[in-house]
Image (spheres, grey):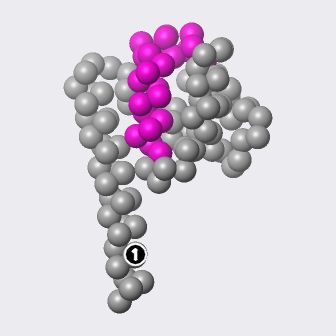
Amino acid sequence: LKKLRELLHNQPGQIEGMVTEKDVMEVLSGDGAGLLKSLGLQVSAAKALFRLLDVEDMRAVEVDEFVYGLLHLKGNSTTIHMTTLMYQSKRLLSKMLNIQTLIEEKV
């Protein structure tokens, strides 16, 4: 995973440790494909993970968070389901906090 992390960090135009979905797909269709395969993961799982992590719909996630998420996906289907639930909960919390902020601004 160190090599994958390096590849993602070295993407041109990267801002402060963030990576876009396009950058992730470029890395995973090139040198990163073998690295992902060695973890027993498919590109579709990495793409789904990216979307789960992008809780604020910024079209970018932190490189380290993405790589850490890949580690969570490695394993059996129960692990994958639990990881999905964890990130969906994170997304829901973010949306709820945004709604709370909007409500507080109007009061």
Image quadrant in which you'd find residue 45: top left
> Of 77 and 56, which appears nearest the observer?
56
Q: Which residue lies furthest to the front in this view?
A: 106
Left or right? Give the position of 21 relative to 101: right
Q: Tell me the residue at 76%/40% (across/down).
A: 13
| Residue at the disc numbered 1 | 101
Quick one: SS at disc 1? helix
- Residue 42, image x, y percentages: 44, 16
Image quadrant in which you'd find residue 71: top left
Image quarter of the C terminus: bottom left
Three-letter code for the amino acid on which mark 1 is drawn: Thr
Residue 58 appearing in the image: yes
Residue range in magenta is: 32-54
Q: Which residue lies furthest to the bottom in this view?
A: 107
Above/below status of 52 relative to 79: below
Q: Tell me the residue at 49%/11% (across/down).
A: 37
> Of 98 and 6, which appears nearest the observer?
98
Image quarter of the N terminus: top right
Q: Residue furthest right?
A: 12
Is 58 colored magenta in this rendering?
no
> Of 2 and 47, which appears nearest the observer?
47
Q: Tell me the residue at 38%/30% (across/down).
A: 72
- Residue 11, image x, y percentages: 72, 32
Q: Tell me the residue at 40%/40% (across/down).
A: 52
Q: Is the magenta stretch mostly helix, strand or loop?
A: helix
